[in-house]
Image (cartoon, rainbow, N blue to C red):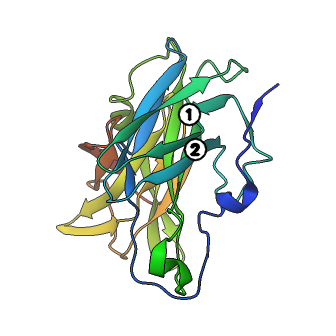
Amino acid sequence: MKTRSTIQSALAAGMLVLGLTGSAAHASVVLGGTRVILDGKDKEATIRASNEGKTPALIQTWVDKGNPKASPTSIEVPFTVMPPVARIDPSKGQTLRVLYTGEPLPTDKESVFWLNMLEIPPKATGDLADANRLQLAFRTRVKLFYRPAGLVGTASEAPARVTWRIKPAGKALAIEATNPTAYHVSYAGIDVSAGGKTIRNQEGGMVGPGETKTFPLDGEVGVGADGTVHYRAIDDWGGPLEGDAPVVPAS
């Protein structure tokens, strides 16, 4: 039986409104990475949560399948996070362990999930307890990749194997990326250059194993046989992995 998250659905919304007014706020607890890679041979992965604020913070954690609106009480995933609830004092940290509970997942390609961390603000005390205040619970979501042992190739090689094709998108153009690898490839941005001109997609996105994804472009420049894609992919550590690839022109 898959692990069922027990976090209350009210917390899944990522925001708790406890008053009427307040000042600008920001998250105090930050994660030490933009993604978690769980290698199949290890059965668990870790990521550090650090409290950079001036007051203690309470966090709750869970994993979802990709729908940020899904109630944690109804999510069934083959992972559990330990500890699911933790108090972190100022300038301190907590190591979060993401454990694979063994339910079957594909063995020939990566699977992607999302790790959630909800930071619940401390209860106001003293004069602040009587004031009308808005307290927000900040939610952070990062990708969790389950990477089975024995996959062909490496994640760092995958972006160079993606093929690109220009296609019409109304009055504009789009670039279609096909990923033949067993790995997810995430992009921070994509440029398409031809004839001394460049059109871009600055939003990026992710192409899953064996998938094709279309990225809209912000211009109408014609691209011929000499067109080139310059991509800015994201590696396992959240860093840039840039490269160039030829473009198949629109037919």
> Where is residue 193 shown, x and y percent of the image?
25, 61
Tags 2 and 1 touching, CB below 8 Å: yes
> Where is residue 147 shown, x and y percent of the image?
51, 24
Vertical side of 132 occupied by 176: above or below: above
To which quarter of the image does residue 46 belong? top left
Q: Label 2 amino acid?
A: Thr
The residue at which mark 2 appears reads as 61
The residue at which mark 1 appears reads as 83
Q: Secondary structure at mark 2?
A: strand
Q: Label 1 amino acid?
A: Pro
- Can residue 248 be seen here? no
Closest to the observer, 239 or 95: 95
- Can residue 1 be seen here? yes
To which quarter of the image does residue 118 belong? bottom right
Closer to the chain start, of discs 2 and 1, is 2
Q: Nearer the viewer, mark 2 or mark 1?
A: 1
Give me the residue at 31% from left, 37% from top: 237
On residue 127, which mark appears?
Answer: none
Report the number of discs: 2
Query: Position of 141 compared to 90: left or right?
Result: right
Closest to the observer, 115 or 88: 88
Give me the residue at 55% from left, 34% from top: 209
Give me the residue at 32% from left, 60% from top: 54
Crowd band around label 2 with a 10 angstrom C-alpha radius: few (<14), some (14–19), many (20+): many
Vertical side of 140 occupied by 134: above or below: below
Vertical side of 30 occupied by 79: above or below: above
> Where is residue 220 shown, x and y percent of the image?
37, 76
In 3D space, how far apart are the residues under numbered discs 2 and 1 (Cα atoms)?
A: 8 Å
> Where is residue 107 shown, x and y percent of the image?
62, 18
Give me the residue at 48% from left, 29% from top: 181
Q: Secondary structure at mark 1?
A: loop
